[in-house]
Each structure stands twice: as C-alpha cells, then as structure tokens.
Image (spheres, rainbow, N blue to C red):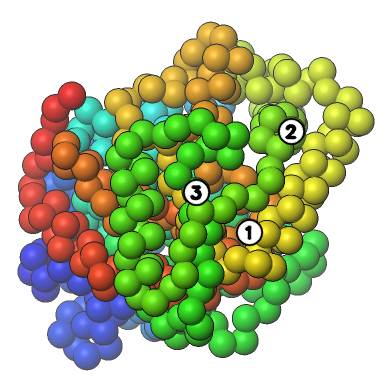
Amino acid sequence: MHLADYLSRSAVGLARTVRSGEATATELLACARARAEQVDPEINAIVRTWYGEAARRAAEGPSGPLGGVPFLYKDLSIAYGGQPMSAGSRFWRGAVAPAHTEISRRYLAAGLVPFGQTNSSELGLACETAPTAFGPTRNPWNLARSSGGSSGGAAAAVAAGIVPAAHATDGGGSIRIPSHCCGVFGLKPSRGRTPFGPLLGEGWNGLSAHHVVSRDVADSALLLDLVHGPSPGDPYAAPAVPEGFASAVGRPEKRYRIAMLTETYDGRPVDPDCVAAVELAARLAADAGHHVEPARPAVDMAALKRATRTLVGANARGALLRRARELGRPWTADDLEPSTIAWAEEAGHLTADDYVAAVLTIHGIGRVLGEFFETWDLLLTPTFAVPAPPIDTVDVREPDFDTYYAKLRSLSEFTSIHNSTGCPACSVPVHWNAEGLPVGAQFAARLGNERALFAIAGQMQEMTRWTDRQRTLLQSATFASSG
C-alpha cells in the first residue's frame, strides 16, 4: 500500500483493505512507521516504539474487525506486557508492564497492531502535553501551539496521520481537549463503560475513562463496541447498550432537544472563536431538525473545583506513594514536575472528611446533571475556553500551585464537569479560525447515552466535511510554525 492511500483511509477502511487482500497488516505497519519517521521529529507525539513486536503480530495476520490496523497506546493507564510504562514521568523510569491490562487485551482481540506509546503529561495531571521527561508534543496545525493534554501525543499522532485512531484517557478533558486543539474527534464514554482492570477498579474515583481519539466518528463508535463492558470484579458498569454504538453514527433516533451554553457556568465569557464553534454546531443541529435553545444546569462550580482538586490530588499522591515503595525511596524534585509535587503535598494535608465531602460533591453534581438531562437530550458548550494555546500556557513547572490550578480550571471547566458526573461527552471539530487553528464544540448526554453523541457527531461530520480540512494536513510532510 502506498503511504498516500494509507493516509486517506479510516481505521475501518484500512481493516477492509486487509480483509480484501488489497494490503497486508505488514504493509500497513510499514506505512505507519514511514509516516511516524516523516513527521514525528517535528511534533514529538511518540515516546517509544516496539516495531519488532508489532512486526511479529502483523506477520501473523491478526484477525478481528480491525485486523491489521496500526495503533498507538497512551503512556498512561494502559499496559502492553513486557514494554515500559512511564506515565509521562521520570519517577517511573525503568518500570515495565508485567502483563497486558484488560483494555489492551480487548484491543489486541479486535486485531489492532500497537507499535508504541504516545506522549502524556505527567500522571495525566495537565491539559497540555509538555512533560520534562519527554518534552512538548507540538500541534500539527501550528508547531508553536499546544496539542492539548493529557492525551496530546495521541491527538497529534492522529491529526498528523501516523494512525487513524489512538488510545487515550480522560480524567478532566484529556480526550476532548486534545481533540479540540488538534482538529480530531474525541469522545469520553460514560463512567464504567470501559474497564481499568486488573490493577485498578476505577481511575481517579471514577473521573477517568479509557477510549480513543480518531479522525472519523465511525472509528470511535466501532472501537467502543469492541472494548466496552465490565470485566469480572469491576466495581460497577455503565448502563448496558444492547444495540451497540456503530449503528448510531449519524442516525438520531428522534429530534433532540439541545441546550446551548456559550459562556462559563458562572457567566464568564470565553474566546470568541470558541463561541463561534458552538454557534456553528447549533445552526447545523437546527438544520438537521433538532431543537436548540440557550439553557444551563445550575452547577456550583466553586464546589466542583474544590472537590476535583481533592480527588485528583489524593489519587496522584497515592500513585506516587506506591511508586516510592516499589523503588524503596521517596520522590525528589529531580523525579517530578513542581505541580505534581504540589498536588501530592497538598493531598498529604487532607482529612478523611475532606475526601468524603469531595465524593459527595461530585455525586451531587451528577444528580443535577441527571435531572437536567430529563428535560434535555444534549448539552452543547465550548470544549475549551480558548483555541489551542501557545505551549506552556498551563505550565507544569509553575512554582505557585494556586496559580497553576486556577489557569488549569479556567480553561477546562466545560470538560471536567462531565468527568465528575460520569456523563459521556465528545468534542467535534466543526470550526477553524482565521489563524487556521481547529476549534471544537462539545456535546454531552445523560449517563449511558453515547448513542446520541455518535448520532449527532456523525451528522456534524457529514455536514461540515471536516475530513476535507484534515486531508490538507495529511498531505503535508512538514508543518507550519508560527506564533
């Protein structure tokens, strides 16, 4: 297969070429490697590869619905047995996965051919991807801009054409924010939809979820079909969806009632480009026959910020303490970002009451959203408060933690609320601004209703033809760098 053909196809399309005999899994892997060698020196999306192991799998002719499709794992929360796993951190240097995690086993059973890991912020704690351990991942649309985070490596790799879809995780927007920044599609599934086992029952008290970023909505839906569902012993599961997800793409089951919000939950303005993306998505939805009007859930954002600061900090500290026990030594300033140390130190002063209060707060906000979605089918908002910002806008090396956290939350509140509630949400790349940067709009739905998101996102893709925009980037061998 020629590289140009590889770049023009979705994951579903590439799998079809393998089944038909038009191409082999080995040829697809060669194309992925060639594209990575062509563009990754510029964008720094991939932190390590295992081409030898991947070549062995490809030569075996992997079967499954996505048999032979090259794939990348995020360097966080997913393990390929025998390969390093560093969580974007110097503190995990030398750590090796003892076995595949459950979601990795499911990707392999689907026929995917993983060949490496993508860059992540340390422990997934930032909405940018610029860890000291590996350096910044640059946005393919503008190398001076952030790729978002924490799954910035995954989104940049997909946007640049290395793979059509890549694994990602989302604990506060880490799938949707990079998708917004890099002009691809990203959906965070419902709490409990995808498994964290066997080492963990949940991520960040249920704030985090596994899924992918992709250029095509149909790829995301099929991949969720292939990996969703609890594994034995999981603490809970999302509501079952017997019909699956792929059949919903672009096919709404009814005329949706869509609430639209173009400012923050407490009434602060966001960047005009982000408002423009929401307004465009609203017009497209109305043109498709849906009902759209302004409305907002009554959310106490101050309480939500306190609760997530507590829960994320407690989980980060727990991970660091476990690693310290493995190494037989405490962490030092040479091991971790200043912001990570600040998360952990602050969490060390929390009480049991603080922790329980934080859990009760996110559950209460989940009730607010649950009631809101009794009236509304979807909530349409900006994905992020600004288009892709310059690298280090949210700097993990910021010495003042309050300053760092305020910047983080001011930009990401549209995404993080749905991690707290467990509701599914997606970013759709509907708009490009005057600087040529992609700008996403976010749709969210009630717990368990990913089908509605795939339906509306499929309509958005068909109406905007965002893949035409993406194709201009895929045809590039080098990317622009400007302020």
The image shows residue 110 at horizontal and vertical percentages of 45, 77
| Distance (Cα) linking label 3 and label 2 | 20 Å
Circles 2, 1 touching at the beta carbon (< 8 Å) = no
Q: Position of residue 321 (x, y in %)?
A: 73, 28
Residue located beneath label 2 in the image: 303
Which residue carries the number 3 mark? 261
Mark 1 falls on what kind of element? loop
The residue closer to the viewer here, 227 or 181, is: 181
How packed is label 3: few (under 14 Cα within 10 Å), some, or many (20 or more)?
Answer: many
| Vertical placement of residue 51 versus 391, above or below | below
The kind of residue on which mark 3 rests is Leu
Residue 424: name its quadrant. bottom right
The residue at which mark 1 appears reads as 423
Q: Residue at x 27, y 88 (%)?
A: 19
Q: Nearer the viewer, residue 329 or 177?
A: 177
Task: Please tell me whether mark 3 sits on a helix, a strand or a loop.
Answer: loop
The residue shown at (50%, 23%) is 407
Q: Is residue 99 visible?
A: no
Q: Earlier in the sequence, mark 3 or mark 2?
A: 3
